[in-house]
């Protein structure tokens, strides 16, 4: 029997129990135990930690870690909290996460394309008025980010008949029917042609504050914005100003600088903003446990650590 795998996270009791049960089912040959149940001697022997927003002080009490498996796709907080001296961090790459994110992108793209915010405002004033229908083929959706999530979203949107544009920091091959953009000039080009912009970018030093007043001003007048990436990518004050000026029609926000979003935030009450509680790409215990089990088995068989986060890039 290998040494136990430590489980560390800021989860409530029910969430922790669900993840532990899923991990036990996915890899019955392993012993996964909460950090608090491990003795000091056992902690010294731990080589793998599975984490979900862990306490860095607890991670530091595992001196012989070979690698850390995150249960989340986003790892910028983990990289920041653990610092450059931590063991390699492996982010969760889960096909089910890509599917659910693509599903959310399509759902909220329809929400904007079918003018649901306008109908919601009409309901508040008991206004019965049908707005002109816009077919998906007349709507260009611009995706910021062409990783696994962006590619899955592009496929789902294309199947629904939308015109697709996609931007990445460096030039990438795009699927047939997708108009590709890259680099700073490419970002301005995508923003200028997109009726709806969907942000799926990770948070890095380069993407923090990327959608500022200047970039929002470069968007197509009346365009909508969906941010499913990370909150700090969009400058909130600049977004509110763009909405107030009519430069943008509506913003659907699922991620924020501070979560939960503070009650005093103006985003809650702005008529041009839909606030979601970080639900666009939920981690499913069963599917994530299967991915983690595959990584652990490969490591046990070969001794090779799974592909880890590039700390310089931040993901």
Image (spheres, rainbow, N blue to C red):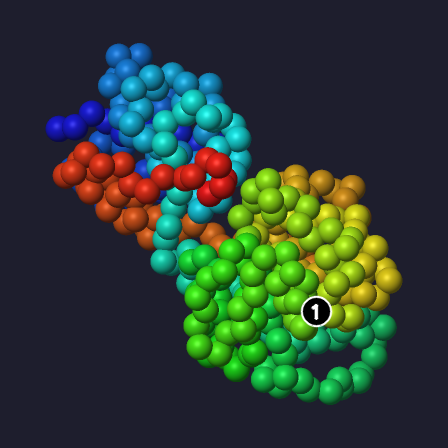
Q: Position of residue 138 (x, y in %)?
A: 63, 84
The residue sitting at 33% across, 52% down in the picture is 287
Within 10 Å of disc 1 (Cα), the crowding (few <14, some 14-19, many 20+) is some
Q: Position of residue 155 (x, y in %)?
A: 45, 72
**Res 195 quadrant in image:** bottom right
Residue sitting nearer the eye, 259 or 65: 65
Q: Position of residue 207 (x, y in %)?
A: 61, 47
Residue sitting nearer the eye, 179 or 315: 179
SS of the residue under disc 1: helix
The residue sitting at 73% across, 57% down in the picture is 215
Residue sitting nearer the eye, 149 or 58: 149
**Res 219 quadrant in image:** bottom right
Q: How many discs appear?
A: 1
Quarter in which the N terminus is drawn: top left
| Residue wearing tag 1 | 192
Residue sitting nearer the eye, 147 or 152: 147
Q: Is residue 175 visible?
A: yes
The residue sitting at 49% across, 69% down in the picture is 154
203 to the left or right of 312? right
């Amino acid at each position: 029997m290998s040494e136990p795998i430590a489980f560390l996270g800021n989860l409530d009791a029910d969430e922790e129990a669900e993840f532990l049960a899923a991990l036990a089912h996915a890899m019955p040959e392993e012993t996964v135990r909460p950090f608090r149940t491990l003795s000091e001697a056992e902690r010294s022997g731990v080589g793998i930690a599975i984490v979900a927003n862990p306490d860095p002080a607890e991670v530091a009490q595992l001196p012989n870690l070979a690698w850390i498996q995150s249960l989340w796709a986003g790892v910028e907080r983990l990289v920041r909290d653990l610092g450059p001296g931590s063991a390699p961090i492996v982010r969760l790459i889960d096909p089910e996460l890509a599917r659910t994110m693509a599903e959310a992108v399509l759902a909220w793209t329809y929400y904007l394309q079918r003018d649901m915010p306008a109908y919601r405002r009409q309901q508040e004033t008991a206004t019965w008025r049908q707005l002109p229908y816009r077919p998906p083929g007349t709507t260009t959706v611009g995706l910021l980010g062409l990783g696994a999530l962006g590619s899955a979203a592009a496929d789902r949107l294309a199947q629904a008949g939308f015109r697709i544009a996609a931007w990445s920091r460096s030039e990438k091959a795009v699927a047939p029917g997708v108009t590709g953009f890259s680099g700073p000039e490419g970002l301005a080009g995508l923003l200028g042609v997109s009726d709806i912009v969907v942000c799926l970018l990770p948070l890095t030093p380069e993407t923090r504050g990327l959608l500022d007043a200047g970039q929002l001003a470069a968007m197509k007048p009346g365009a909508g914005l969906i941010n499913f990436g990370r909150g700090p990518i969009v400058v909130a004050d600049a977004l509110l100003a763009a909405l107030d000026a009519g430069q943008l029609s509506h913003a659907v926000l699922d991620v924020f600088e501070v979560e939960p979003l503070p009650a005093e935030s103006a985003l809650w009450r702005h008529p041009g903003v839909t606030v979601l509680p970080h639900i666009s790409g939920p981690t499913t215990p069963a599917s994530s446990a299967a991915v983690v089990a595959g990584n652990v088995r490969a490591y046990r068989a070969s001794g090779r650590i799974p592909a880890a986060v590039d700390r310089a890039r931040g993901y």
